[in-house]
Image (cartoon, grey):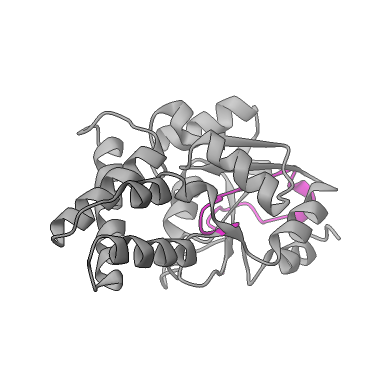
Amino acid sequence: MEAMQNAPFVPEQIEAIIFDVIGTLVDEDTAWASVAEKVAAQAGLDMPNDLHQLWVTFLEQRMNAVIDGASPWEPHSELVSGAARDAVTSLGGTMSVEASNLVSFLDRAYTAWPDVADGTAMLRHHRLLAGVSNGDLDSLMWLANANSISWDIALSTGSAQTFKPAPAAYQYTIDTLGINPASTLFVAAHPWDLRAAAQHGFRTAYIARPGADRPSDDDRFDLSSENLLALTELLSAD
């Protein structure tokens, strides 16, 4: 993929790397599918796949309503829980206390992709590393600790009371970290995230992850890699 910016991409000019977290560093789909199966069983529903898909749809609707200004901001974990309750109710089930606890702490329970511990450690030897997520700050702390994620700081878009891909989320990142987007690589498994980041001047790197959307034919990113270890080679950081 070619760069989205006119200036040529020079790896040596990258001073910082920003990672999307959920989906890019940790596997959300497997965790959601597992919890959806447990919640469906407890709710007396024999359609875990339907529950999973409806839950995701309701969460996206809730987050988009916040981004559009139609709903007040709520922590990501609360939106996840509310979307799960809506999905269970829509399918004719009843949310149990145990199921509520499962979904309330789901954002803390993701498992990192196998390359993440070594990949972030290697990249951090040469550049500043940050995580920027729609997830809540406490969840990012738990995920980093459980999965040996190496970064210098983690930011939650909740501090800006919005969610990516709202422009305010990226501007919050720039202002809080005091970085120059032109010398910062934004890494994500979500093309929509990279498109929005590029609009704010970030250089971009797409990481292919199972279950994530694939780039369109029109997408142009500075780098494309199958995993973080390969990314270190592209950046000559090993």
Query: Going 46% across and 52% down the picture, which residue do you hit?
Result: 193
- Location of the N terminus by quadrant is bottom right
Along the line of sight, the residue nearer the viewer: 150 or 232: 150
User: Which residue is pictured at 54% across the width and 53% down the height?
Assistant: 109
**Is residue 202 visible from the viewing direction of this image?**
yes
Placement of 41 over or under 126, stated as above or below: below
Nearer the observer, 19 or 98? 98
Q: Which residues are magenta?
A: 1-26
Establish if 86 lies above or below 50.
Answer: above
**7 is within the stretch colored magenta:** yes
The reply to whether the magenta stretch includes residue 189 is no
Whether residue 52 is visible, yes or no, is no
* Residue shown at the point (57%, 35%) measured from the top left: 155
Viewed as shown, does residue 140 lie left or right of 231? left
Quarter of the image where the C terminus is located:
bottom right
Toward the viewer: 195 or 131? Answer: 131
Please tell me whether residue 70 is drawn above or below residue 233 in the rendered image. above
- At which x and y percent is residue 8? 66, 56
Q: Nearer the viewer, residue 40 or 187?
A: 40
State the image quarter where residue 45 is shown: bottom left
How many numbered marks are there? 0
Dominant secondary structure (helix, strand or loop) of the stretch shown in magenta:
loop
Image-based side of 143 in relation to 217, left or right: right
Rendered location of residue 63, percent (x, y)? 31, 43
Instruction: Tell me if 218 is positioned left or right of 8 in this view.
Output: left
Q: Position of residue 10 (x, y in %)?
A: 73, 55
